[in-house]
Image (cartoon, rainbow, N blue to C red):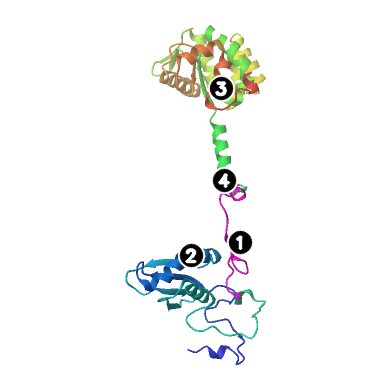
Amino acid sequence: MSNSHLFLKSGFPRAPLQNGLGRYVCQLQRVTLKFCKHHGSSRGMRQFIENHLLDFAKENPGIVVYVKPRRHRTPVLVGEYLNGDREWLSCRNNTKDEILKWMQLLKTQNGPSSSLRLRKMWHTDMPSIQGPWTPFTLKSPDTNLATYPNAKDSQPLDIEESATEKLIELFKKQKLDNQSLNVLVFYESLCPDSKRFLQNQLGPNYDELGDFIDIKLVPFGNAKSVDDGKEFVCQHGPAECLGNLKQSCVINQTTNQTAQVKFVVCQMTTHWNDNDVKECSESVGLPSNIDNCVNTQLGTNLQLEAERITKLYQVTYVPTIVYDKVFNQDLQQNSLKDFRATVCNLLRTRGDISLDDEVCK
């Protein structure tokens, strides 16, 4: 179909060209230089490649240049355009300067047919007529060149974190916050060594270390269940069994570890009686009435669970302190002498605190 009806007789266009691209966009997409390495008719082509091809490629970064040697064939230039057209030019016995002129001609055309002649420069306020925007539109090709190493271009870009990256960081922080140092304390309510550790080591240091440890108190020690778990026998007699039971019931009332520790330390500092249980419970804000636990199966189940955990770690001495669910004899001995220093060394090893942290000074 002819396109002659799209233009006025004067030659001024009233519609876009057939390929839909404006005259200000270079139409030459790719050019291929085919030549023979040895034949005399390709001497000019070879000289052009050696002397002018690199400069042409730098001046026209939007044009892809291929070099294709072939044996005993006539040298040709093949231009490929954005509209799909191709143009073949024979360069037999051409000089390098003549080939350079042919290259410049291919760059100004949009196909093998002759270009439409215009009486004046084509101007339009519609960008679509000029074709799709490219980085090279209305710019000098020199702006596409850069010299490396380039200190300015080598600097890292300051890019703000994306929402996904921020969420990942929050997740990692939350994960680290949840990984406190796990501490298990196995003890007996009437054991002198247990009292000494709770009064002198755990009690005075818990307020400062509490944010860094996840502590669980297990009042059972060397006791054992008998009569299918209905009764318990303790190292220091029935009074100790009752003390273990009452402490289990009070501890079970809350998940607040600070309240649990302060109650147990309070109880281990006084003599066992009902008034002590009431005073120590109320001092940390816990209910003092634990009859519904002590006199029911709930209290028995709590002591059976304490026995299960104690046997799991094969506790033979009380108090026994286990860190991160792994018993270590050296840490055990160090904890009895200096609980705070032992915990601080473990926290530094884990990277939870620095050497200059106020907690462990």
Establish if 155 lies above or below 214: below
**Three-letter code, disc 1:** Thr
Give the foreground label among 4 and 2. Answer: 2
Give the foreground label among 3 and 1. Answer: 1
**Three-letter code, disc 2:** Asn
Give the foreground label among 4 and 1. Answer: 1
Residue 251 has which mark? 3
Q: Which residue is mark 2?
A: 51
Write the residue at 51% across / 75% down: 101
Q: Report whether 74 appears left or right of 145.
A: left
Describe the element under mark 4 as helix, strand or loop: helix
Front-most of residues 112 and 158: 112
Give the foreground label among 2 and 1. Answer: 2
Describe the element under mark 2 as helix, strand or loop: helix
**Mark pair 4, 2: CA separation:** 52 Å
Closer to the chain start, of discs 2 and 1, is 2
**Three-letter code, disc 4:** Glu
**Mark pair 2, 1: CA separation:** 23 Å
Give the foreground label among 3 and 2. Answer: 2
Q: Which residues are magenta?
A: 130-156
Write the residue at 67% across / 19% down: 283
Write the residue at 52% across / 15% down: 244
Where does the image place residue 198, in percent across and percent down from the top left?
Answer: 57, 13
Crowding at mark 4 (Cα within 10 Å: few <14, some 14-19, many 20+): few
Q: Which residue is mark 1?
A: 143
Residue 165 has which mark? 4
**Mark pair 4, 1: CA separation:** 35 Å
